[in-house]
Every structure is written in C-alpha cells, then in structure tokens.
Amino acid sequence: MLITLGIYYLAPWIRWDRGINAPDQAILFDIPNSRAYFFFIEIWPQEVYYITGILIIAAIGLFFVTSLFGRAWCGYICPQTVWTDLFVWVERILQGDRHQRLKLDKSKFSFNKFWRLLATHLVWIIISVLTGGAWVFYFNDAPTLMLQLINQDVPWSVTGWVVALTGSTYLLAGFGREQVCNYMCPYARFQSAMFDEESLIICYDELRGEPRSARKKDSSWEGRGHCIDCKICVHVCPAGIDIRDGLQMECIACGMCIDACNNVMDKLKLPRGLVRYDTELNHKLRKENKQEAVHIFRKRTILYVSVLFITISTMLYGLINRSPIELHVLHDRNPIFVELSDSRIRNGYDIKILNKTHQDKNYKLTISGIDDLDIKIAVAGNIMGNKWFNSLPVFADSIGHFRVFLTAQKQNNARQQLIFNVEDVYTKIKENSDSIFISSLE
C-alpha cells in the first residue's frame, strides 16, 4: 500500500530536463498542447498508436500476472483496494479493531462516539482531497499548480476535477468498498477465463482442516482437523466470503484470511498454511499422495510472454527509430490545377513540417519527379525568395505551415508522381512524402 500510494502522490513531482523549450515534469499529460510526456518519451496526437500499444501491454501483463498469481492485481495494486485499505487503517487508528468498531456503531450517541466518527470522516476527506489534487498534477505542472492552489487562483476546470475526484474517492473507498468489486468492476466476471489449474490462488487445505470443530482446551487432535471453525477468516475477509467453501468470484486474493488463520495456528502451536496461496493442481496431487509441482512456463504463460515481447519490442523499435521530423503534403482540391497563359501547368500544395525537437529548426526543401520544375513558396500569402528552399524555419515543438506552388510543362501523364523531401540543415535528418502533379483531367 505504501509503495503504490508513494508512486501515485510523488510521481508528478519528479523532474526531467528536456531543454529550455519543454516542460521538465517527468510524467505529464499536456492536454492544451496535445502532448504526453513520460521521462524521455514524448507522444504527439498522431502517435496515438503508442497509447494503444501501452494499453495492449497493460492488458496482456494483467492476463500474465493473473495466470501465474491469480487476482494479485485486485488484492495488492488496484486503486480501489489500496484506498479502501488506507481508509480502513484510519478507522482502525481512530475507532479500534473490528470488534471495537462494531461495538461503537451499536453504542448510544455520546461525545466519545461523536469525536471518533467526526475525526474519521475528516481524515477521509483530507485524503480524498489529496487524492484529487494529486491526479490533476499529472495534467499540469505540479509546482506551478500547487502555488495556484495555495493562492486560490486555479482554473474552474481544475477545481471541478478536484471536487469530482474528492467525492468519488470519499464515496468509493469510504462506503462502496468491496461492493465496487462485486457490482461495478467487470474484472471478477471474466477472471476465470484466465485461470488454469496451476494459477496461484488462495486455497483451504481441507485434507488437513477437516473435519472441523471447536476445540476445547487440552483436548486431543486425534480424529479432528486443524480447523477449529472460529470463522475469523470470514470476519477479516473484505468481501465477506468463506474461503473454506472454495474459490469464489468475490475473492480478491488480498491474503487477509491467510494472515488471520496463521495467527490462530500460531496460538494453537500448529503448522501454518491451513489457508495459503496454492494451486488446484497441487491440491489434487496431495489428495493422490503425489509430489507437488509448480510450472511457471506453460502454454498459457508462454503465449502471454510472447505477445508482450513482440509488442514491447515493436514499440521500442518505433521509439528508437522514429524521426524527429514529420512531413505532410496535401494537394489542392479546388482548383486541382491552373493552366497559365504560356501553356504551363501550376499545382498548389499545403505543406506541414512537424518539428518534434525542443530546438528551433531550419529545413531544406527539395522536390523530385519532374525536370525543370519551377518552385515558389508562399508564407502568409507572400511569395518568398529562392533562399527559403534552403531554410524553412519551424519553431521548437511546432508545426510549420507553407504554401508551395509548382509550375511545369504539361506532362505526358495526367498524374505525375512527385517526392517531397525535407532535410534538417544541421543534423541532415531527412523525411519525405509522396504526392502527384496533375496536368489534365484525363
């Protein structure tokens, strides 16, 4: 819990130097400028396929973890579980253990009851506000937004998100709790499709525990199982299930029943593990008096690892080899071409040069495919000189818009293929785009 909470609250404050023209927050979703930053990775809107890749990796990773360790995500990392555990911890500090809380709820109204409940809900609200505030830090520069919050000078959109997330955290972690897992989360419904008999789940060792019965002091264990039917495993379960009835959809594999049962076994001076993480295969093997086995590498897990490897490798290759330049050429649609008085044909194009770097750049433009091609570049409606071909300026993290007019003799082909090429004047990195030169409607 501390690790996941620490990552969530502190990650927006990690700094990452990207240069003078770029934000220095390591993890930032810059909605106004349509950027996403994750340490050295910068994702533009047209690179949404990287987001798709991340979602695929997350999904397959979840399937892989589930096939090995059951619902480890639900029990240890899921935000609903983490914040519920945090709220329960606050309850335990201010109101006592489960027995004391039940007693307090049933007691008559008093000052003791009033201040304990008031303090609990105030701490819950503080945690909820911090949770909502930490979330909006991922979408804004954290130090700047913090100063705005202190000075009460934040945009209404930020305030709205903080209020909404504060309310949802307070309601879901404070009151919804396991009901969110049972009725709102779809994961429990399809988790069985990712389990096999070698997935690690919480099991009750019925061979050792049955027949169960209450134990009297100094009585013998002969003819009895080690389960004394104290039901403490049921009481501590956040979902309220009895793990002795077998694996159930509501079980989130949090392990609280294991800890509770082990404490009872310690008091009875019996071996731990009556309730433990185990596999159905091992349970069957014990019934047959065979050696237990653990197979991490099996068909299902090998398939998941293969898909993960392919997806991660593809994304890394794309990130490492992606060009810092993008070139987009759009041919005019109306008019498609213009026939000049000297019988030559002119075509117009919109050119967009995307500079993904954090420095201002100059690009050299060349066009191939037609001999004796006359090239004119217009910026803001003004035809520029020939020197512009060798130095098209584009600001850092920006898109340069240019109008290009090509004039040539009428071609034999109605549509002649062209290749537009831009080259960074300093780094010599190139990018090209195909287009056509239309000289007739035939």
Image (cartoon, grey):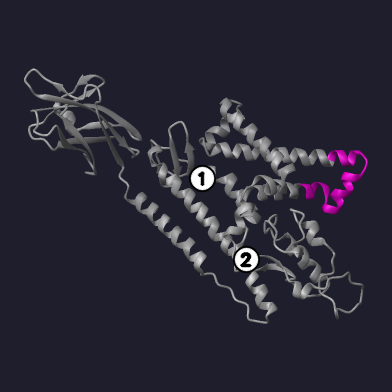
Give the percent coordinates (x, y) of residue 91: 78, 47
To which residue does mark 2 refer? 200
**Real-space Cα distance between discs 2 and 1?**
35 Å
Give amino acid for label 1. Answer: Ile
Residue 154 visible in rendering = no
Where, by quadrant of the figure, is residue 311 drawn?
bottom left
Q: Which residues are magenta?
A: 91-115
Magenta segment's dominant SS is helix
87 part of magenta stretch:
no
Residue at left 84%, top 49%? 101
Give the percent coordinates (x, y) of residue 280: 65, 69
Q: Is residue 264 above or below residue 342?
A: below
Give amino acid for label 2. Answer: Leu
Residue at left 45%, top 46%? 52
The quarter of the picture where the C terminus appears is top left
Q: Is residue 348 left or right of residue 211?
A: left
Q: Is residue 39 left or right of residue 162?
A: left
Check disc 1 and report its element: helix, strand or loop: loop
Give the percent coordinates (x, y) of residue 415: 16, 33
The image's mark for residue 14 is: 1
Residue at left 73%, top 59%? 256
93 part of magenta stretch:
yes
| First of labels 2, 1 by sequence position | 1
